[in-house]
Image (spheres, rainbow, N blue to C red):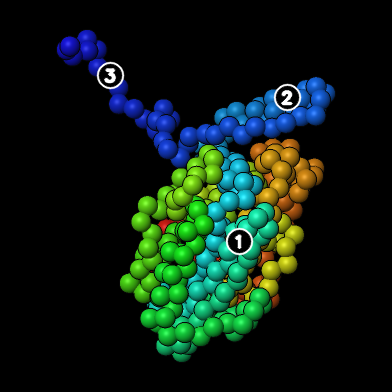
């Protein structure tokens, strides 16, 4: 044993295999040889498109595949969470919404909730984001005190894990994860994993980001994630009164179910956006890239939002 005769170069990013880049294999059945040959031709065509593709897009496509494979097992719990905070101080949380689904005897069980912090009702958003606190569309909002608000969220995360793996679904997870870990909530997030398994586990706590899942489907390698409003429009969903935490949670899980419950990624791209998928990125018309300013308000140039707003989100938003 000794030193090498020549220097060994340090590894660089292009040759490192990170945990986020690990791939999985999903079985697909074909009814006959003709179907298989057709599928092989499509795969060859897709592989040519993928040649030289940005590693971020490759990773997002893998996230899509993993999320879809786990979801279609119909096990565990998939819970979308969203928070709203005062626009002038993000440590003041004003709302929380959730929507979860699980299965009993193959049948879907669902719950949708919207909580408002009583002590923070005086903090109203007007300047940068619209105030839709009182516009919950899927039930009756519940006004709770700060301590009860905290307990309800912590109890939710703890109780849902008895059904197996718990997948926390967010649209741009960074800000909401910070809220969960803040002194206002202190959610039990021990063992939280950002790497989705390649098959459904018996237990565990995982993060799913619909902004990444959608970017994989769309074929986007942009670091600016699309807002919930824009994603809903491009998926032909009529979302109303966003920036209400309950509504945001509802539509976040709705777009996830639509993607994860559908066909494989490239077949789904063709189904959703026929004649727009010649390249890796779906070619939307200019009007399809716009959002509805009548719902989300008018904002000054340069304003960006941490979730669900009109503008593309910045991964570096401060907490």
**Residue at the spot 71% in from the left edge and 56% down from the top edge:** 235
Distance Cα–Cα, label 1 vs label 3: 52 Å
Label of residue 177 in the image: none
**SS type, badge 3:** loop
**SS type, badge 2:** helix
Residue to which mark 3 is pinned: 8
Distance Cα–Cα, label 3 vs label 2: 40 Å
Dot 2 and dot 1 residues touching (CB under 8 Å): no
Indicate which disc, 3 or 2, sits on the residue closer to the N terminus. 3
Dot 1 and dot 3 residues touching (CB under 8 Å): no
**Residue at the spot 73% in from the left edge and 24% down from the top edge:** 40
Which quarter of the picture shows residue 274? Answer: top right
Distance Cα–Cα, label 2 vs label 1: 35 Å
Tell me the quadrant of the picture where the N terminus can be found: top left
Residue to which mark 2 is pinned: 40
Residue nearest the observer in this picture, 239 or 195: 195
Q: Nearer the viewer, mark 2 or mark 1?
A: 1
**SS type, badge 1:** strand
Tell me the quadrant of the picture where the C terminus can be found: bottom left
Q: Is residue 205 visible?
A: yes
Residue nearest the observer in this picture, 82 or 277: 82
Residue 74 percent coordinates (x, y): 62, 50
**Residue at the spot 25% in from the left edge and 17% down from the top edge:** 7
Instruction: Report whether 7 appears left or right of 88.
Output: left
Label of residue 101 in the image: 1
Q: Dot 3, how many residues are within 10 Å of its Cα: few (below 14), some (14-19), or many (20+)?
A: few
Residue nearest the observer in this picture, 122 or 318: 122
Q: Nearer the viewer, mark 3 or mark 2?
A: 2
Q: Dot 2, how many residues are within 10 Å of its Cα: few (below 14), some (14-19), or many (20+)?
A: few
């Amino acid at each position: 044993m000794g030193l090498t005769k020549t220097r060994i170069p340090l590894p660089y990013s292009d040759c490192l295999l990170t945990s986020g880049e690990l791939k999985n294999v999903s079985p697909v059945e074909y009814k006959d040889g003709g179907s298989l040959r057709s599928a092989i031709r499509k795969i060859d065509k897709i592989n040519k498109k993928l040649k030289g593709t940005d590693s971020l897009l490759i990773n997002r496509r893998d996230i899509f595949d993993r999320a879809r494979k786990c979801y279609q097992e119909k096990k565990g719990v998939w819970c979308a969470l969203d928070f709203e905070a005062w626009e002038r101080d993000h440590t003041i949380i004003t709302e929380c919404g959730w929507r979860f689904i699980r299965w009993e005897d193959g049948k879907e069980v669902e719950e949708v909730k919207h909580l408002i912090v009583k002590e923070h009702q005086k903090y109203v958003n007007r300047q940068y984001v619209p105030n839709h606190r009182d516009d919950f569309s899927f039930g009756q909002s519940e006004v709770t005190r700060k301590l009860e608000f905290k307990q309800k969220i912590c109890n939710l995360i703890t109780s849902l894990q008895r059904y197996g793996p718990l997948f926390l679904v967010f649209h741009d997870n960074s800000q909401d994860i910070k809220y969960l870990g803040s002194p206002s909530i202190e959610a039990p997030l021990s063992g939280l994993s950002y790497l989705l398994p390649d098959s459904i586990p018996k237990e565990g706590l995982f993060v799913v980001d619909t902004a990444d899942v959608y970017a994989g489907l769309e074929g986007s390698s942009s670091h600016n994630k699309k807002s919930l409003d824009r994603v809903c429009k491009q998926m032909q969903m009529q979302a109303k009164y966003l920036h209400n935490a309950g509504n945001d949670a509802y539509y976040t899980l709705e777009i996830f179910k639509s993607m994860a419950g559908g066909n494989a990624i490239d077949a789904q791209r063709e189904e959703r956006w026929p004649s727009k998928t010649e390249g890796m990125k779906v070619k939307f018309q200019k009007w399809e890239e716009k959002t509805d300013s009548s719902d989300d308000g008018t904002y000054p140039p340069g304003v960006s939002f941490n979730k669900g707003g009109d503008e593309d989100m910045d991964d570096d938003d401060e907490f």
